[in-house]
Amino acid sequence: MERQEIEIFLTLSKELHFGRTAEHMGISQSRVSQTIARLERRIGAKLFERTSRRVTLTAIGEQLRDQIAPAHQQIEEAIAKATAAGRGITGGLRIGFSGAFTGHLLHRISEVFTRRHPGVEVQIRQVQISDPYGPLRAGDLEMQVTEMPVAEPDLTLGPVLVSQPRVLLMSSSHPLARRTAVGMEDLAGTTLLTVAGPVPAHWLDHHFPRETPSGQPIPHGQAITHWEDALSLVLAGKGVTPVAAAGAHYYNRPGLEFRPLADAPPIDYACVWPTDHETARLRAFVQLAAELVRKAGGPGKAVEDLWATGDAAN
């Protein structure tokens, strides 16, 4: 069997759908049908049973799949490892994230990445909101996915992987919790928690403004250094804070409410890395991340099904 024949057969064995197999392989559906028919003539037996409703493996088809799939995986891994070594895509890759949902997405992407590049070990950890670029500049991380805007002369801004509507996190007893949605002007009547530490002023102004669009002052409350501080302060009624809509799944707990900020811009999370420390493995990871996010429907769709399917990267 030729390599493409094996790949078409194994893909169809997994998808059990000629159209999806053709789309996955980047070939025509007739090419898939012709390849399977040729294999069946060569073997002298049916590998698939086809009806107008479904496609299933025959007993001989299952036997063939079980016998060649492990060998095919070993060959693919060996080729990927040799290719990665030839391109310098080896070693370790340390990646940071802010926001549990971006970390969840990165772990899914890293699973695909390590299958393609077995010679790279990917480590992923959270970056504290109070020091967003410190680990990058100290060399503890090679890349991170973080909230925009990013306007740092020593950092390169890569593709946006996640874009989420902005919502307002508040306690259940807060007056705004009685509404289905709130606006930026409503912030004039509440206390906005903010962030402490070496955080760029333009970033703070974007996420924690000091006045509403009409110019009304927005009172600022305690500045936090860890995200968990914000949750406890909100629960205690000490203020409100804007978060990404996906946070309603990851941080939901009794006593907290999330309300859409109807007229606020979305929160975008992009890849960022030190300009003078760009490597082949980093470029390969960013390229794959952008590819998988695009296949998932774009930054606005990249994380919406993570908690339902457990995998938004495939």
Image (cartoon, grey):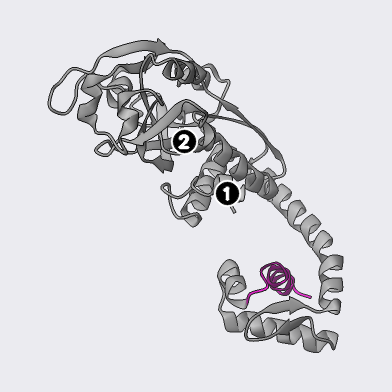
Which residue is at the far left?
A: 214
Which residue was labeled with disc 1? 308
Residue 248 - label: 2
Q: Nearer the viewer, residue 155 or 102?
A: 102
- Say whether residue 2 is left or right of residue 127: right
Q: Nearer the viewer, residue 271 or 235?
A: 235
Q: Is residue 15 magenta?
A: yes
Figure check: 175 above or below 270: above
Task: State the image coordinates of residue 304 (x, y, percent, origin top left).
Answer: 49, 47
Q: Earlier in the sequence, mark 2 or mark 1?
A: 2
Q: Residue at x 38, y 23 (%)?
A: 173
Range drawn in magenta: 1-17
Q: CA distance from mark 2 to mark 1?
A: 14 Å
- Which structural element holds mark 2? helix
- Say whether residue 35 is left or right of residue 235: right
Viewer can see residue 280:
no
